[in-house]
Amino acid sequence: MNIYIRAAQTISPQDTFPGKGIPENIKVHENYLKCILPDFKKYFNPIQLRRMNTLIKSGNVCAIEALKEAGIDKPDAIITGTGLGCVEDTERFLHNMLHTNEGLLAPTSFIQSHNAIGAQIALNFDCKGYNVLFAHKTASFESALLDSILHFNDSEVSDILVGGFDEITLENYNLKKGIGQFKGIPSTNLDIHSSISTGSIPGEGISFCVLSDHPFSGDYAILESVKILSFCSSEESIKEWFIKILFNHGLVPDNIDLVLSGLNGDFENDKIYNRILNCCFKNSGHGYYKHLCGEYDTATSFGMWFACNAIKRNHIPSHSLLNEKSRPLNHVLIYNQDNMKNHCMILLRRPS
Amino acid sequence: MAGKVYITGIGVISAIGKNAAENLESLKKQKTGIGKIEILETKYRNDFVAGEIKLTNTQLAEFLGINPVLNLPRTTLLAITAAKEAILNAGFDPQDNLRNGFVAGTTVGGMDKTEKYYYHTDQNSAFIKSHSFGNITEQAAEHIGITQYVTTLNTACSSGANAILHGTRLIQQGLLDRVVAGGFDALSKFTLNGFKSLFILSPDLCTPFDKNRKGLNLGEGAGFVVLESEELLMKTGKVPLCRLSGYANTNDAFHQTTSSPNGEGAYLTMEKAIIRAGIKVSDIDYINLHGTGTDNNDLSEGMALIRLFGNNIPPFSSTKSYIGHTLGAAGGIEAVFSVLSITEKLIFPNLFFREPIEELGFSPVKDLISDARVQNVLSNSFGFGGNNTSLIFSTN
Amino acid sequence: MIAKLKLLIIKQLNLEDLKPEDIDAKAPLFGEGLGLDSIDALELMVLMDSEYGIKINDPSEGKKIFFSLETMAKFIEENSKIQ
């Protein structure tokens, strides 16, 4: 059974929403990337908006546009991934609790700390189907994608809404900058590619796609494969991993027209991408996307949106290219890892 | 196409014991682990009771042979304790050449350390990295030695059950040979205050499914089962404990935190799980309820029982009267209790029950039933966000 | 009092796009009218405490007190420790 990507939408730090392609001009952000938010009032009334924090509002609006694009009223299942969930509300409740020394606390920011995005989408669309959230660092979105494949295989479903989302707050940025996880020197998203210092350049985003078990004209791509290897510190083993996966799909590395790597500005972490790409995929086009969205646990959901649009238009802007190899985009591979953990691969193929 | 999935090992730590044998003893003796809060540093230790594990983090670490100086989050220590026991019980080497996975559910993550050091990063800043849900699972996976596939789910109180559901599908569809699946959560001020702000904490011992129930008691712990494929068992010749025969997850789509009055989500989920197990409704011998002791859950779940079973509701109980509501761990711990129900032929009672809920008119099991016919156990876990999961455990 | 209460409710319940004139002081707040629910009632209990020093310990008391803005204002006048 093939899985078709029927719709793909993203709310990001670039002008991408709704339904716009990969931007040719990059919006520059200093130190960390924040999303360009849509006008939520166009989608919800004030009473509905009261119970939704920014992430929930964005997730719901993104889902609405994805379902509209796919032309379906209600998905059969909703499977999502997030690294940290509703950070803003978690901080709010935590501060209130600590400041008041466990005084009388308002509940709204507590109840949003859980799987509220998927739950709110279910509420809005009256969707009683399978609905789960994966929350495993940089493998959260891939776990959700993998689960959608499992769900297609064993349940009678036709269309699944799959999403990845994470938000960054100033507070969270400062905490992580303080421990060196985020870059400590002033920088912009344009510095990712040429970075020679440690610390990534963080961002945020909300991306949703609609996967379907039957084709339709206008589909972006076929979701060929999703693979996760949780711990592996050997580059040789990673190369073998790729070769084995591709072999099982009747492919060799040379068949991959474009590899999108998770370069994030931390030059120590980024070294592996250059080595793997130049060794294993030396004849393929090399590209990256986090200069548009920043680094966050579910950034590969933006990467997949990027890849879908690249395949559909058979083009990626020059600012995303890392080498001179330009080939018709039939097979695109997205590879991401986090300090040799959570090696994740998404393989897309042009629909015939 | 889908092969059978068997359970070959169990591991659990809760307020009624630090391993499966101790938990079983307490279940048989009808001895609750809910009591005064002694370890969690909260203003409300005299106002609420909880299913607290009476072991400090230092004691947990020492028991595991981990240096306490590492100051690992309590959730990590609980997860490792239960996962290690499950692996030992199943008798396999996590580093063997098979495709092993570790799938866990949690709601708290590393919050116990985060809330302690949030305003004291000069004392400890490790929480900044360890806070995230996935990081705890990763820490536990590194300690137990599973490296191939590790992931985390967070669907509030159904997290542990959904982890087992995910693990089952990975094996059925041939992606993995073996999965250690379940859930873990530790008590934290954050969750205590969060549930307090919703006014659903009972100041006394919880009384699930009772007319005069006043709310839930929080608990903590970890529970894991080892899932293996039929194919693997045929090669090793191992005799499993029981089978994971059915599962389902649906969404109530009613409200962010409350369940629908007619128990729609719960009803759909239980029905779907039974259909997937290929059994009849009348084949269920025991239901381990979600049964938190709140007004809303128990009535909603009760209505769903009536809709599904009619006048023939099988024996049912909530073991939360023993250990409290362990949130993300609940699905995992209660899975272990469901397995024990089958292997020991026991039906556990619903402690502290006095009077049935008026609208329902039926009662849970009040005393331990020994030498019971237990061939199929239905275990429910329902979370905020209308997340409803049911698992079915069956004899081999 | 009613005017101030409207602004406080708008803030506490995060109804930022609602204007005071959109809220009818006599209309029911829950079920119909604004269509608030049990979580909003808990938020209003926190508001009573933080703004007026009035402690409501049982959420079920909220049904009567929070029926409408008018009933809320009356309750505050009868119970407030702060003028």
Image (spheres, helix red, strand yellow):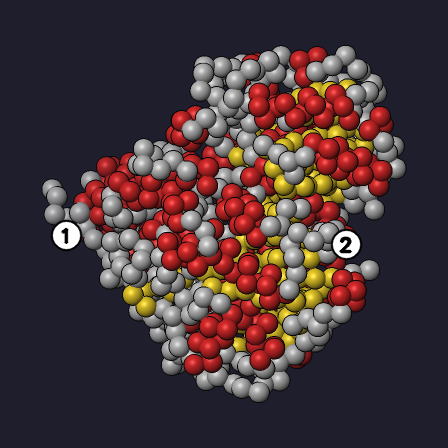
- What residue would you read off at disc 2? B174
Going 26% across and 57% down the picture, which residue do you hit? Answer: B44
Left-right relation of B143 to B177: left
User: Where is residue B283 shown, x and y percent of the image?
Assistant: 67, 79
The correct choice, above or below, for A244 with respect to B237 in the image is: above
Instruction: Answer whether labels 1 and 2 touch (C-beta < 8 Å).
Output: no
Badge 1 marks a residue whose secondary structure is helix
Query: The residue tagged with tag 2: helix, strand or loop?
Result: loop
B179, A107: nearer the viewer: B179
Residue B330, given in percent of the width and then of the height, sits at 50, 62
Q: Quadrant of residue B352?
A: bottom left
Q: Reply above or below: B333 against B147.
A: below
Q: Nearer the viewer, residue B76 or B356?
A: B76
Asked if residue A82 can be seen in this view, the reply is yes
Q: Is residue B260 at least partly visible in the picture? A: no
Image coordinates of residue A120 in percent, x first then y, are 53, 46
Mark whose residue sits in front, 1 or 2: 2
Q: Could you tell me residue B38's position as x and y percent?
A: 29, 61
Question: Which dot marks residue C78?
Answer: 1
* Viewport quadrant of the C terminus of chain B: bottom right
The residue under label 2 is which amino acid type? Gly
Neighbour tally class for label 1: few under 14, some 14-19, many 20 plus, Cα within 10 Å: few
Residue at 76% over, 23% down: A279
Question: What's under tag 1, amino acid-wise?
Answer: Glu
Q: Residue at x 76, y 69 (%)?
A: B237
The quadrant the N terminus of chain B occupies is bottom right
What is the crowding at mark 2: few (fewer than 14 residues within 10 Å), some, or many (at least 20)? Answer: some
Answer with left or right where residue A37 lies relative to residue B116. Answer: right
